[in-house]
Image (cartoon, helix red, strand yellow):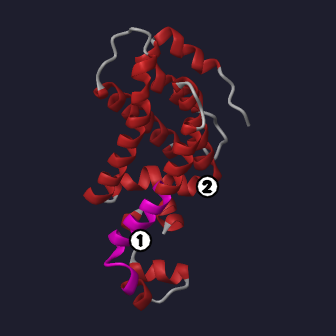
Amino acid sequence: MIGMVGDHGLAALDIATLCRRAGAGQAHFNRCFADLDDCFSNVHDETAATLCERVRAAYDDRESWHDRVWAAGTAAMRFLQEDAVRARFLLVAVNGAGAAARARRDRLVRGLAELLDGGRGDSSGRGVTSGCTAEIAAGAVYGTAVARVEAGSLERGEEFLPELVYLATMPYLGARTAEDELLVQPLR
């Protein structure tokens, strides 16, 4: 599922082709899933859960919010870089896979917003008092990650983590301070 959808999109896939590629019979597929969308949803949920576990563990392992953002971003970037096809499946293919899939995408963005909302305490009196700020920043981070994955940045080995950290921290730390994030050279 990940390989075929990540390479060609869900619309180009049918159950018979998926079963052939997986080396499973259609009867087995029918016992496990209601339809192709159900299979997609299950695999997407599992993949997203793995990403979220890694990100949350990295985030929780740091003290300051700024360091937490970097740690979470690094964990997410490494997860995406491990398998560019899986990254396309998780971030890009979900956008064309129907309303249920988009709800899954929205859960990922809300989870990111929850992490970023910790920045309210680090906003240095800049008046950031709304959870809406985190939602906007999370949308910007997610949208930028999707665009970069879609453009093949992972396959080319491009680092865009500093840009994502900039987008995440700018509403809380201010533009000037956040611009310093763009100068950071990520660890390889």
Q: Which residue is mark 1?
A: 13
Badge 1: how crowded within 10 Å, few (<14), some, or many (20+)?
Answer: some
Does 125 appear in magenta? no
**Going from the N terminus, do you reach mark 2 or mark 1 first?**
1
Tell me if residue 153 can be seen.
Answer: no
Query: Is 43 part of what is drawn in magenta?
Result: yes
What segment carries the magenta color? 31-48
**Disc number for residue 165:** none
Kind of residue at badge 2: Asp
| Inter-mark Cα distance, 2 to 1 | 20 Å
| Residue with the most extreme right position | 188
- Determine the residue positioned at 46% across, 42% down: 146
Query: Tag 1's secondary structure?
Result: loop
For discs 2 and 1, the disc positioned in front in the rendered view: 2
Residues 100 and 15: in front is 100
Residue 174 point in image, percent of width and height = 45, 12
Residue at left offset 74%, top offset 37%: 188
Query: What amino acid does circle 1 point to?
Result: Leu
Whether residues under marks 2 and 1 lie with C-beta atoms below 8 angstroms apart, the answer is no
Q: Which circle marks residue 83 in the picture?
A: 2
The residue positioned 64% from the left and 37% from the top of the image is 158
* Residue 126 seen in the figure: yes
Q: Which element type, helix, strand or loop, lies under badge 2?
A: loop
Residues packed near mark 2 inside 10 Å, few (<14), some (14 to 19) or many (20 plus): some
- Considering only vertical position in the picture, is 21 above or below 183? below
Q: Main secondary structure of the magenta part?
A: helix
